[in-house]
Amino acid sequence: MPEKSTKIFFEYKETQTDKESKRLDVFLSETMNRSRSLIQKSIKQGLVFINSKSVTKTGEQIENGDIVSGEILENPDDSAEIQAENIPLKIVFEDKDLLVVDKPAGLIVHPTSFLKEGTLVNALLYKYKNDELSDLNNADGFRPGILHRLDKDTSGLMVVAKNNQAHVALAEQLATRTLKRVYWAVAWGNLEGKFKEDKGTIEAPIGRHPIERKRMAVIKDEKRKSRFARTHWEVLEELKNATLLKLTLDTGRTHQIRVHLDYIGHPIIGDQTYGGKKSKTSLIRRQALHAKSLSFVHPTNKEIITLESKLPLDFLMLLDKLSLG
């Protein structure tokens, strides 16, 4: 594997939907999709700036409009353990700056400290190991080029940066919500019948579940850590005791769509984590959630790129089983 670079440069202007201040390490970890510990090391070394002023406190608060810039150090020792693997990928768009992957359900996006094989990152490292135009191998070893992720059992579109310039530009679009993502999901029950409308908005703060640490939950207790979250839903089709929904996000919390739909009593069909008593079903073997479309401004030529993904076969079969026709 090629020698790793040591720094990733960035600059973001912070804009927050919830109008509240935010911890610096949390903001950078979420925006750059890097581990909190990696971010904290860089802050403590004085490599991060708020409005051009160096800060060394990881819990420094940032406000709306603050400009956060600097460098993030990578961890070459960890990245050296990640091996390239010949895993087929469906690429729907690619040029010298970025690519967009149509991720299948079942594929984990990036390795962890415990899992180092069979991920999207392993596949990317294999595909670009001899590509001189690609800087994928010169980014954070656990997540080279990865800007955002989809859960293992969520399918659909993901954008991947091929160089630092593209990474910075696309990450800023993610942070300011100008990179648009639209999801389709099949949820239990009839939302239009319950809410008397064919569209609506869910606003409920999300935080780590107080007991089950691998789950997220709506947390309204001010003493517990939670963050503002907003999800917009629209009914696309009423089905047999189910609804096909179009969903867009104003915030990007972990498992946000899954948590919010469960919160209003309409969990996603097949969701083993948030489906409750309805999680066991033979209709589909994973949560019926698909990243259907993606739109962003190209980081180099500034053209608007809009891409659509076809629904996967298991999703189509689910719709057929639940059809009212």
Image: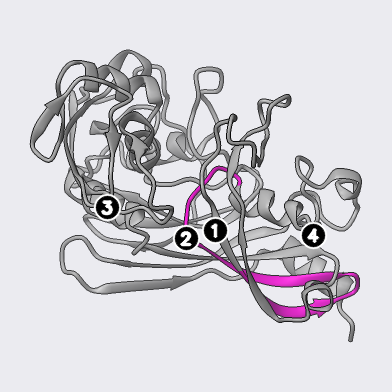
Residue at the spot 55% in from the left edge and 18% down from the top edge: 114
Does residue 251 belong to the magenta stretch? yes
CA distance for labels 3 and 2: 15 Å
Q: Quadrant of residue 254?
A: top right
SS at mark 1 in the image: strand
Foreground mark, 3 or 2, reads 2
The amino acid pointed to by label 4 is: His
- Under circle 4, the secondary element is loop
Residue farthest toward the front in the current orientation of the protein? 222
* Mark 2–mark 1 distance (CA, rounded to whole Å): 5 Å
Q: In front here: 162 or 73?
A: 73
Quadrant placement of the C terminus: bottom right
Q: Which of disc 4 and disc 3 is earlier in sequence? A: 3
**Rendered view: 198 above or below 211:** below
Residue name at image x 55 percent, y 38 percent:
226
> What is the C-alpha distance between the residues marked 3 and 4?
33 Å
Q: Amino acid at mark 3?
A: Glu
Q: Earlier in the sequence, mark 1 or mark 4?
A: 1
Identify the residue under disc 1: 230
- Range of residues picked out in magenta: 233-255
Picture residue at 51% right of the left edge, 41% below the top:
87
**Residue type (three-letter) at the residue carrying disc 1:** Arg
Depicted 138 relative to depicted 247: above or below: above
Which of the two labelled residues, at mark 2 and mark 4, occupies the earlier sequence position?
2
Q: CA distance from mark 3 to mark 1?
A: 19 Å
Badge number at residue 266: 4
